[in-house]
Amino acid sequence: MRPLLLTLFLAALPLLFGYWVNTHAPYPPTRSYTATHCTRYCTLYGCRHATAANSPAYFQLKPLYAATVRALAVGGRGWYAAVNVGFYLLFVPAVLLWLTYGAIRNAFAIRQLKQNRAA
Protein backbone atom coordinates (compact mmCIF):
# COMPACT_ATOMS: atom_id res chain seq x y z
CA MET A 1 0.00 0.00 0.00
CA ARG A 2 2.82 2.42 0.81
CA PRO A 3 4.46 2.15 -2.66
CA LEU A 4 1.11 2.94 -4.31
CA LEU A 5 0.54 6.01 -2.13
CA LEU A 6 4.07 7.27 -2.77
CA THR A 7 3.58 6.74 -6.52
CA LEU A 8 0.31 8.69 -6.48
CA PHE A 9 1.93 11.49 -4.47
CA LEU A 10 4.80 11.72 -6.96
CA ALA A 11 2.33 11.72 -9.86
CA ALA A 12 0.42 14.62 -8.29
CA LEU A 13 3.48 16.88 -8.08
CA PRO A 14 3.66 17.75 -11.82
CA LEU A 15 -0.09 18.35 -11.86
CA LEU A 16 0.17 20.73 -8.92
CA PHE A 17 3.14 22.49 -10.50
CA GLY A 18 1.25 22.87 -13.80
CA TYR A 19 -1.72 24.30 -11.96
CA TRP A 20 0.51 26.75 -10.10
CA VAL A 21 2.25 27.88 -13.31
CA ASN A 22 -1.07 28.40 -15.10
CA THR A 23 -2.61 30.37 -12.25
CA HIS A 24 0.44 32.60 -11.75
CA ALA A 25 1.28 33.29 -15.41
CA PRO A 26 1.81 36.99 -16.15
CA TYR A 27 -0.28 36.87 -19.35
CA PRO A 28 -3.64 35.21 -19.99
CA PRO A 29 -3.48 32.34 -22.50
CA THR A 30 -4.29 33.37 -26.06
CA ARG A 31 -3.99 31.91 -29.54
CA SER A 32 -3.37 35.26 -31.21
CA TYR A 33 0.11 36.48 -32.09
CA THR A 34 1.73 38.92 -29.67
CA ALA A 35 4.98 40.63 -30.60
CA THR A 36 6.22 40.99 -27.01
CA HIS A 37 6.07 37.35 -25.87
CA CYS A 38 5.29 33.80 -26.96
CA THR A 39 1.69 32.62 -26.92
CA ARG A 40 -0.08 29.47 -28.05
CA TYR A 41 0.23 30.92 -31.55
CA CYS A 42 3.93 30.04 -31.40
CA THR A 43 3.10 26.42 -30.58
CA LEU A 44 0.56 26.13 -33.38
CA TYR A 45 2.29 28.02 -36.19
CA GLY A 46 5.96 28.29 -35.25
CA CYS A 47 7.66 30.87 -33.07
CA ARG A 48 8.57 34.15 -34.76
CA HIS A 49 10.40 35.23 -31.60
CA ALA A 50 12.99 32.45 -31.83
CA THR A 51 16.27 33.12 -33.57
CA ALA A 52 19.34 30.95 -33.91
CA ALA A 53 21.06 33.25 -31.41
CA ASN A 54 18.46 33.20 -28.61
CA SER A 55 17.00 29.70 -29.16
CA PRO A 56 19.51 27.28 -30.71
CA ALA A 57 17.66 24.30 -29.24
CA TYR A 58 14.45 25.40 -30.98
CA PHE A 59 16.11 25.11 -34.38
CA GLN A 60 17.83 21.83 -33.51
CA LEU A 61 14.58 20.23 -32.30
CA LYS A 62 12.32 21.68 -35.02
CA PRO A 63 12.76 18.62 -37.34
CA LEU A 64 11.91 16.28 -34.46
CA TYR A 65 8.83 18.36 -33.63
CA ALA A 66 7.69 18.28 -37.27
CA ALA A 67 8.21 14.51 -37.41
CA THR A 68 6.19 14.07 -34.21
CA VAL A 69 3.32 16.12 -35.61
CA ARG A 70 3.38 14.10 -38.85
CA ALA A 71 3.37 10.82 -36.88
CA LEU A 72 0.44 11.92 -34.74
CA ALA A 73 -1.49 12.97 -37.86
CA VAL A 74 -1.08 9.58 -39.59
CA GLY A 75 -4.80 8.83 -39.29
CA GLY A 76 -5.71 12.14 -40.87
CA ARG A 77 -6.21 15.62 -39.55
CA GLY A 78 -9.38 14.63 -37.72
CA TRP A 79 -7.52 12.02 -35.65
CA TYR A 80 -4.61 14.26 -34.65
CA ALA A 81 -6.20 15.53 -31.43
CA ALA A 82 -7.43 12.07 -30.39
CA VAL A 83 -4.04 10.45 -30.99
CA ASN A 84 -2.30 13.35 -29.22
CA VAL A 85 -4.52 13.00 -26.15
CA GLY A 86 -4.33 9.22 -26.17
CA PHE A 87 -0.57 9.10 -26.47
CA TYR A 88 0.60 12.04 -24.34
CA LEU A 89 -2.17 12.16 -21.73
CA LEU A 90 -3.01 8.48 -21.35
CA PHE A 91 -0.31 6.13 -22.66
CA VAL A 92 2.89 7.95 -21.61
CA PRO A 93 1.66 8.83 -18.08
CA ALA A 94 0.36 5.28 -17.58
CA VAL A 95 3.74 3.80 -18.55
CA LEU A 96 5.58 6.28 -16.31
CA LEU A 97 3.27 5.52 -13.37
CA TRP A 98 3.72 1.78 -13.91
CA LEU A 99 7.53 2.11 -14.02
CA THR A 100 7.57 4.41 -10.97
CA TYR A 101 5.35 2.06 -8.99
CA GLY A 102 7.56 -0.91 -9.96
CA ALA A 103 10.74 0.90 -8.91
CA ILE A 104 9.25 1.99 -5.57
CA ARG A 105 7.78 -1.47 -4.92
CA ASN A 106 11.17 -3.05 -5.64
CA ALA A 107 12.92 -0.56 -3.33
CA PHE A 108 10.52 -1.46 -0.52
CA ALA A 109 11.03 -5.19 -1.20
CA ILE A 110 14.83 -4.83 -1.15
CA ARG A 111 14.68 -2.88 2.12
CA GLN A 112 12.44 -5.57 3.63
CA LEU A 113 14.79 -8.35 2.51
CA LYS A 114 17.78 -6.53 4.01
CA GLN A 115 15.95 -6.12 7.32
CA ASN A 116 14.96 -9.79 7.36
CA ARG A 117 18.53 -10.89 6.63
CA ALA A 118 19.94 -8.66 9.37
CA ALA A 119 17.48 -9.98 11.94
Image (spheres, rainbow, N blue to C red):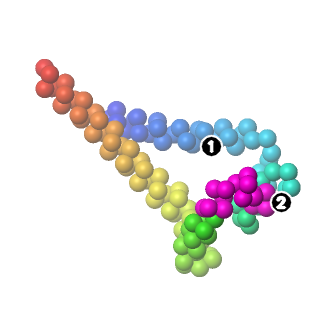
Residue hosting label 2: 33
Residue at the extreme front = 53
Going by the image, does 12 lie left or right of 44? left
Q: Quadrant of residue 56?
A: bottom right
Quarter holding residue 115: top left
Q: Is residue 48 magenta?
A: yes
Residue 75 position, x and y percent, is 54, 78
Examine the rendered structure and indicate whether residue 10 appears above or below residue 67.
above
Q: Residue at x 66, y 38 (%)?
A: 20
Q: Which residue is mark 1?
A: 18
Q: Residue at horizontal 80%, vertical 47%?
A: 28
Residue 78 rendering spot, x and y as whole percentages: 62, 76
**Front-most of 4 and 48?**
48
On the question of residue 81 being in view, the answer is no
Residue 111 point in image, percent of width and height:
24, 29
Name the residue nearer the viewer: 89 or 33.
33
Q: Nearer the viewer, mark 1 or mark 2?
A: 2
Q: Is residue 114 above or below residue 8?
A: above
- On the image, the x and y values in percent for residue 101 come to 36, 43
Q: Give me the residue at 22% from left, 29% from top.
A: 112
User: Considering the image in quadrants, where does the C terminus appear?
Assistant: top left
Residue drawn 41% across the image and 54% down it:
95
Label 1 environment density (alpha carbons within 10 Å; few <14, some 14–19, many ≥20): few
Q: Which residues are magenta?
A: 47-61
Amino acid type of the residue that numbered disc 2 sits on in the rendered structure: Tyr
- Upstream in the sequence, badge 1 or badge 2? 1
Given the current orientation, which residue lies at the most extreme right position?
Answer: 35
Residue 14 appears left or right of 54: left
Q: Is residue 25 left or right of residue 35?
A: left
